[in-house]
Amino acid sequence: MKKKFPLLLVFVFGILGIIPFLIPHPIVQHSDEYIRNDILRILAAFALVLALGSLLKVHADKIKRKKVNWQYSWVLILAFIVSSIIGLFGGVAGTGLLPTSFGSFNFNIQTLYENIIIPLASSMFALLAFYMASASYRAFRARSSEATLLLVAAFVVMIGFLPVASSISSKLPAFAQWVLNVPNVAGQRGVLFGIALGAVATSLKIILGIERAWLGGGD
Amino acid sequence: MKFIDRLTKIDRRIIYAILALVVILPLVFPSALKVKPMKPVEKLYEAVDNIPEDKALLLDCSYAPQIKAEVEPMAIAVLRHAFGKRKKVLVLALYVQMLGLAQKALTQVTEEFNSKAQTNIDSIIYGRDYVFLGWTPPPLIPMLGMGESITDVYPADYYGNQTDTLELMQYIKNYNNIGILVCLSGSAIPKAWVMYAQNRFGLAVGVGCTAVSGADFYAYYQTGQFSGLMVGMKGAAEYEELVEENLEIKEKRMASEAMLPMTYAHFIIIFFIVIGNIGYFIQRRRK
Amino acid sequence: MTLILLTAIFALAPPGEVRAYDTPSDGGEAITIEWQLSQDDAVLDGYEIYRSEDGVNFERIGLRGPGRQYFEDVTQDGKSYVYKIAAVSKTTKIFSQPSGEAISSPQWIDRNKLNILFAIFIFGGFIMYFMYHARKGKEFFIRKIAGLQAVEDAVGRATEMGKPTLYILGLGYVEEVATIASLNILGEVAKKTAQYNTKLIVPNADPIVYVVAQEIVKESYTKIGRPDAYDPDSVFFLAREQMAYAAGITGIMTREKPATNFLIGYFAAESLVLAETGASTGAIQIAGTDALAQLPFFITACDYTLIGEELYAASAYISKQPLLLGAIKGEDWGKVVIATTLFIASIIGLLTKFPILDLFE
């Protein structure tokens, strides 16, 4: 029973997911919307509570047992409390119960987002340039004929898209473009076919209860 | 001996430091690098240039803050071009968090023109020369609705004016009065414009996008669904070049100034790859 | 000259032959109206669409720029409507003859998607066929996938070094196939860590995925007979925000220095941040994703990369269950059919004038 019930649920909801794709009738579409928008949201809300609980528990535990770098856990917990209070009582744009502005300064969620999340995310994003440099230095070695081909293609595209490319050779930018448009797109389409078929097969295997690794594996 | 081994194992912190240096230095002492405009950007420039007198340019500034560095120069270059040629302009954004960025670009360019204007005719005047439509959710509504009536979709503009009282909106009614839509975005929005506004109403669509999403969009340019395409910082720099060359507008060129650090960064990466390979080859020969 | 102008102003030709019908394959409340262009289409501003419920009083419901089709989607199902189209220029307007009566209704099947259903049946048929044979005891060959071959060694290495194994599920939601495939692999990896008694760390970006992942790891430990070794805090929620998640994981990588990192699931721009930090701590890294744009980053920065469907095949590969292997065989035949169709269609398209592309509309 412990195994069969989840399998039955997966089968029923898997089929329910396919039907609205084929039947445009409002009865079907409305029940689909109900499952997706209402039931799923309620489930997600419970999962969110569990998730946040787990986050706090892991860090509280770290502080209690004074694990390595436990001090940082205080930063997380304090940030969590402050942003929760602002979010719950100050509202998204300062329209909640609590006053979230002093004179012209607002500390609502929008302000936190614009002044903390966006700059932090942009900096992480900008780090990619550095990681790209170190990764390509380490990985682009002409170890084999395939690796050499990759190396040459990388060179052509990198140089071909530089402003100075046309002064090196007038054909270079067009050739770099060709590398992107033809061999690159051809390879991507091949992988995409595999992905599409693999996705169908994986879904079928799960709906039919053949794939059970998510239940802790076979039998 | 040891030196050769070191070539293949340069500490990543050295690579990071040198890269930071070549990116930051040219930004501290900026100088614009000349670029040769490529065909997709030229086509976009021509499409904007050829907007007839009784039609307007529709500029969709749907770029998020993360990609501002790459796409904002495009917005500024296109606006300079349009205002420089006295084209009428409608500006909008499809998501609310992008409105602030659109507003910023618009204010910057109109101030550039108005600070030099001698007469009323020289000036760029709100309502007469351009309208900032703002935002209306969800994105599908304006894409489809503007095919029938722009003022119905945006009864009020960004500043709260009633759009049907504005001078420009007296003759710019729907897509029939739009010369081209230029969509600036880093996501799949340009494809949605093709799907809904072009397929249904025949609207011409031009695109400016980030370098990463460019690979997805070339196919649309090749089929002619996009009238023109500028990709990444380099595309923006090419457009800036065309604007400066043809209209003699001399203003700060953000993308062209970024070309120098970008070129240096590429060369540094290439340099390290070459060094790594030299070291690798010598090591292998020794074995 | 005047004469031509006058003709243009006063004698617009009306649009011809208006046809209104229930929009096919929809959820009802919509009617499609089509008409023949007016002969003066070139000088027109557009067409106005008028609707009547009684056939006498017409009200204007919309304007169409150049074109010969209009979708009205505010009708009442079961009620009959009649339509007229007016050709409109700056000064005049001329009406067409009214259309026949049209009644909108919802449909029970979307005909446009029948081809997809058909394809799924064919493809599903292949899979079922080979699974049937697998059940009967036929053995299927599966080519060596280096990344999956390395899973056992990678976990073993972590045990020898006394360091943890880090399993990153990516940003995907639970309904994404990449996430599902990754959860399947997590089940197998957790069995190995349970066997070798190695610490497993699973940080999550999505609350629902977190709940599922926790169950899976627990089940795997129980299955191996080591429920005591399972640490409920080994699977935890980190952050939903993309870069916050990436920052949190790089923190774990630099502090805990895991011997093995799995980066399997859906990834976006943070892929290289994770993979490169992992490489800098000296971990063995096995990555897998179906996000095409991130594959190059993983291939350069990781030791092994599962490309696209290799990821989906992984659970079958690791568990070696005959039924799952049979399904992979079925998939391969699906690919053979697609490749053959593409090849034949290309040949026909290139060599003959047969409008082969229309068949795929």
Image: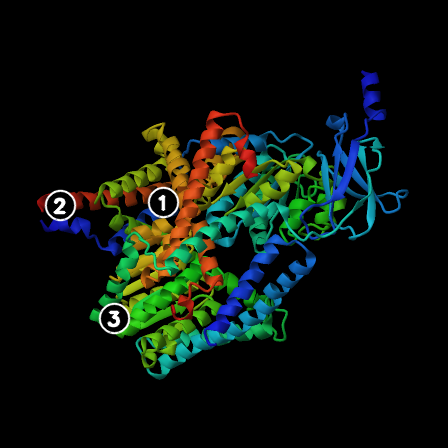
Q: Quadrant of residue C212?
A: bottom left
Percent of width and height locating residue C345: 47, 34
- Element at label 1: helix
Q: Determine the CA span between mark 2 and mark 3.
A: 33 Å
Q: Determine the CA span between mark 3 and mark 1.
A: 44 Å
Residue receiving disc 3: C163
Q: Nearer the viewer, residue C292 or B66?
A: C292
Q: Is residue C121 visible?
A: yes
Q: Nearer the viewer, residue A140 or B65?
A: A140
Q: Amino acid at mark 3?
A: Lys
Percent of width and height locating residue B64: 52, 52
Q: Amino acid at mark 2?
A: Arg
Percent of width and height locating residue C121: 52, 51
Q: Nearer the viewer, residue B24 or A162?
A: A162
Q: Quadrant of residue A30?
A: bottom right
* Depicted C60 relative to depicted B35: above or below: below
